[in-house]
Amino acid sequence: METKHKTRFGRVVSNKMDKTVVVAVETPKRHRLYKKTIRRVVKYKAHDEKNECKPGDTVRIIETRPLSGQKRWRVAEIITTAEVVEIQPKEIV
């Protein structure tokens, strides 16, 4: 019997750690009384086996067994990659 794992879509915030990325998942919710939409951002530490993710990438993460003290997710796929803008020092001035 195959179990269904939870999946989330989010944006990579940091890739400073080895084989680990921090993914920010944003979920909109309506306030019960005032009916205003509130954005709730939760950061997950996810396993990135090949160190492919860069900050700004949109990824799909999937729930998995505990891999370390805080990692319980892994990167399933990179949906879109972030565009890196190269700025020369002469263009800043």
Image (spheres, rainbow, N blue to C red):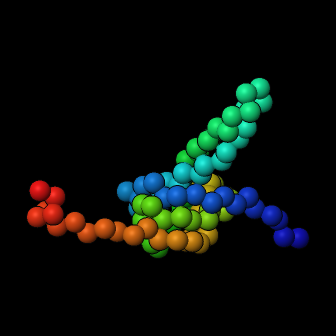
| Residue 65 in the figure: left or right of residue 90 | right
Place of residue 20 in the rendered image (x, y in percent of width and height, measured from the top left)? 47, 59
Q: Quadrant of residue 61?
A: bottom right
Q: Residue at x 73, y 58 (%)?
A: 6
Residue 64 visible within the image: no
Q: Quadrant of residue 72?
A: bottom right
| Residue 24 in the figure: left or right of residue 91 | right
Of residues 66 and 63, the one drawn nearer to the viewer in this rendering: 63
Place of residue 50 in the rendered image (x, y in percent of width and height, measured from the top left)? 47, 73
| Residue 69 in the figure: left or right of residue 5 | left
Place of residue 7 in the rendered image (x, y in percent of width and height, measured from the top left)? 70, 60
Of residues 87 and 76, the one drawn nearer to the viewer in this rendering: 87
The vertical placement of 42 against 79, above or below, is: above
Q: Residue at x 42, y 60 (%)?
A: 55
The vertical placement of 49 against 32, above or below, is: below
Residue 32 visible within the image: yes
Q: Quadrant of the N terminus?
A: bottom right
Q: State the residue lying farthest toward the right.
A: 1
Q: Quadrant of residue 2?
A: bottom right
Q: State the residue lying farthest toward the top.
A: 33
Tally the numbered discs. 0
Q: Residue at x 67, y 45 (%)?
A: 28
Q: Quadrant of the C terminus?
A: bottom left
Place of residue 90 in the rendered image (x, y in percent of width and height, measured from the top left)? 11, 64
Of residues 40 and 48, the one drawn nearer to the viewer in this rendering: 40
Q: Residue at x 61, y 70 (%)?
A: 76
